[in-house]
Amino acid sequence: MISLVRGLRRLSAVSSTLYQMILARGPISVADYMRLALTNASTGYYMNRDVFGAKGDFITSPEISQLFGEMLGIWCVHLWRENGEPSSFRLVELGPGRGTLASDVVRLSRQFSGFDEALKVDMVEISPKMQELQRKALENFDKDTSSFRWFDSIQALPVESSSFTVFLAHEFFDALPVYQFVLTRRGWREILVDVVSNEAGGFRFVKAPGPTPALGFMENRVLPADLEALEVCPSAGLVTLEICRHLSCAKGAALVIDYGRDGPGGLTLRGFRKHSLHDVLLEPGSVDLTADVDFSYIKEFVGSSAKCLGPMTQREFLKKMGIDVRLRALEANASEDVAKDLHSGYNMLVGSTAMGSRFKVMTIISNGMVYPYPFLN
């Protein structure tokens, strides 16, 4: 038995729900634990609070520097031009946070005649609180209100074959629930979440004593011979299938930016609170839970319906998109303090020991589409 035990003196609303569920059903999957802790309608971590920025639990690239959003905006403009400057360009952002990235793209679009008129933005966001912040971020742009729409799931997103469609998934896949497995002498076994006792004693990880239905997610997967632990994210596969469904009907692409690896690996689930690592089993509902993305797993669901290119490092992507040139242009007209902040943000985004190497960038494009820069071969 995995002896990771966490104690709780008082039960939060999420903890109470988890206790009741486990006592009634027995140990639950790590995926169910994540799903309830993060997106429970009334008490989930993401649902009713602003978790981003200095006052939150973590900070994302768009919040670090405008350079990031501008480079993604340039990538969108390039796609628009390379594909005949379509009159309708639909940008779909998955998990848009505060709306900072979408705002940067919309602001940059003003510099490109035709693209600004063609651009409309769809936001896929489950959290009412985040939707509120996103609306505030976009309300100052003088665009028709129909240019901005919100959907609470990718399944609710309508297919629009007449629009060139681009999905942006920045730090989206890492928050999707994962199942965990460990190799034992009796074969692969699922890791589950159990209570420490029938009283308010906290949660612990345990190994399932026998095969569970979730082992089906590992069928037909080619795994390294020395692999002893594995995370699988079926929700990532379902999202990818939905993206490919759109790209098979409407010409377009998806850009996936997240930390992870291009192949199966070990157990990476971790928690963050106030910008520091935090026990994933302690205070569920008040902690960000995240796991590395397996880009090779996403590729398996693309199949023949579209084409996958990459991943490359975020450093390589941003530099090829011209982030150095843009930094120099902004610094030339900035005060000393602003220039210092710009350079600090730049170093975080492209630093070889920071986000620059940790984050990967991959694109999925419609069949028959010209390879977009910088994914040329």
Image: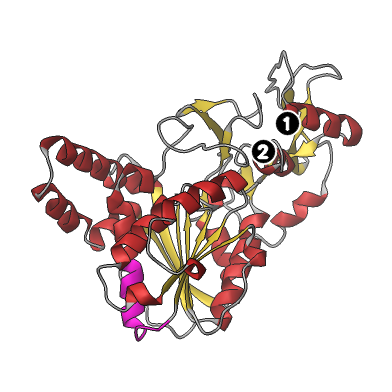
Vertical position of residue 344 compared to residue 160: above or below: above
Instruction: Judge whether 349 appears above or below 285 on screen.
Output: below
The total of numbered circles placed on residues is: 2
Give 352 or 114, whichever is nearer the viewer: 114
**Which residue is the site of mark 2?**
44
Whichever of callouts 1 and 2 sits on the residue coming sooner in the sequence is 1
Viewer-side residue, 269 vs 60: 60
Residue nearest the viewer, comparing 163 with 167: 163
Q: Is residue 286 visible?
A: yes
Name, please, the residue furthest toward the right: 24
Figure quadrant of the N terminus:
top right
The scheme the figure's colours follow is secondary structure
Q: Which residues are magenta?
A: 74-87
Prevailing secondary structure of the magenta residues: helix
Estimate the x, y position of residue 94 in percent, counting from the top left.
53, 58
Asked whether the beta carbons under mark 1 and mark 2 sit within 8 Å of each other, the answer is yes
| Amino acid type, mark 1 | Val
According to the image, label 1 marks what residue? Answer: 14
- Which amino acid lies under the numbered mark 2 shown in the image of this protein? Gly
Q: Kindly state the secondary structure of the residue where label 2 is placed.
A: loop
Q: Position of residue 40 (x, y in %)?
A: 71, 41
The residue positioned 77% from the left and 50% from the top of the image is 214
